[in-house]
Image: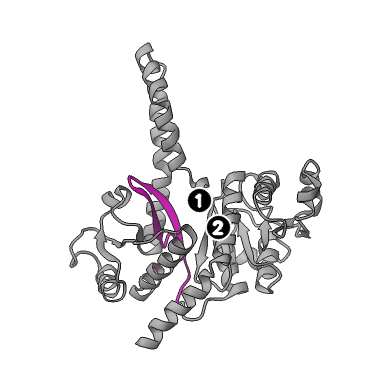
Amino acid sequence: MRIALDVMGGDHGPLVTIEGAMSFLRESPGSDQVVLIGDRDLIKHHLQKQPLELIKRCPIVHAPENISMNESPTDALKKKKNSSMVVGLEMHGRGESDAFVSAGNTGAQMAGSLISLKRIHGVRRPGIGAFLPTEQGIVFLIDVGANVDSRPADLLQFAMMGNIFVTEVFGRTNLKTSLLNIGEEEKKGNELTLQSYQLLKENLPNFNGNIEGRDLLKGKADIVVCDGFVGNVVLKMAESVLGVLVRGIKKSIGRNVITNIGAYLVKPAFSELKRLYDYEEYGGVPLLGVNGISIICHGSSGPKAIKNALKVAKSIQRRNVNRLISEKLNRKESAE
């Protein structure tokens, strides 16, 4: 497999991104390649200490410009044609790579993916999901920001695409899908959730009804569907939870001997909790619904996250996720 990687994207620069690529290649067959897209001189500098056998599997495509996190996506895509983001997506659109991975400007990647890759036939609007830890494992929340004015038909498609992605890439079965709402009752919510409830109920065999925000992390559902505006607010709140807990615990530790002893005894439990809440364990998530594989990583991604994002890209291609999405949506369209 040949994956295009935006080396310039993310908060930590080329060194971290390249190290993630090296980690992926160490664990992958020799036929796999990672195309490093970015400033050629910077890339060569960071490759100097890497093994020659891995360097040979990393062709370089020069793209001197970078789209920063605070730039307007539409303006940046128009003005920075030589950016690593634009060059990488156009490569993938021309079939010169099997996937594209970036930890750069999410808005630019979503807009650029629609321009270069287009949508899968039958998809109204692509959606992006995120994994959140729960008491029972993880939950996949979709949409978390690709759309802020979704319609009920969009939410149904998000649910269908999310089910295919989680089942095929992570091998999970018997999934329960719920709709994020202000109450569990069928008649609760605004027009969007009321109409979406009926669509999900009629078209999704594994629909499990509404779920409230307080139950989201209890593991009552495997996939939770919502409008992108709501999903983005929930995601950013959830990301802050671990930091608040850790800082609160650190303030308590060291005040006296008893708290120090207690901290030592529960250290393994907190290490496991940190691992569960670590977004790097899941790498990145695809923009589901585009006619290609565009993996969006967290801006703060380290080498482990980049490595896992590349693994997700490979799994999506190997499991033919886009073909399955197209087939399922078109079967539904034909039945209507």
Q: Is residue 24 visible?
A: yes
Task: In the displayed orientation, state which residue is furthest to the top.
Answer: 257
| Label 1: how many Cα within 10 Å (few below 14, some 14–19, many 20+) | many
Disc 1 and disc 2 in contact, CB within 8 angstroms: yes
Residue found 35% across the figure and 14% down from its top: 258
Q: Which amino acid type corresponds to the residue marked 1 in the rendered image?
A: Tyr
Residue at the (79%, 49%) spot, across then down: 53
Residue 103 x/y as whole percent: 59, 53
Q: Which residue is mark 2?
A: 312
The residue where tag 1 is placed is 282
Q: Alpha carbon of mark 1 to alpha carbon of mark 2: how far? A: 8 Å
Instruction: Name the residue rendered at 46%, 77% in the picture.
Output: 123
Give the side of residue 210 with respect to residue 17, left or right. left
| Amino acid type at mark 2 | Val
Q: Which residues are magenta?
A: 124-149
For marks 1 and 2 on the same chain, the one whose residue lies earlier in the sequence: 1
Q: Which mark is residue 295?
A: none
Task: Specify whether residue 203 is painted magenta.
Answer: no
Q: In the image shown, does 226 or 81 lie closer to the viewer? A: 226
Image quarter of residue 227: bottom left
Q: Which structural element holds mark 2? A: helix
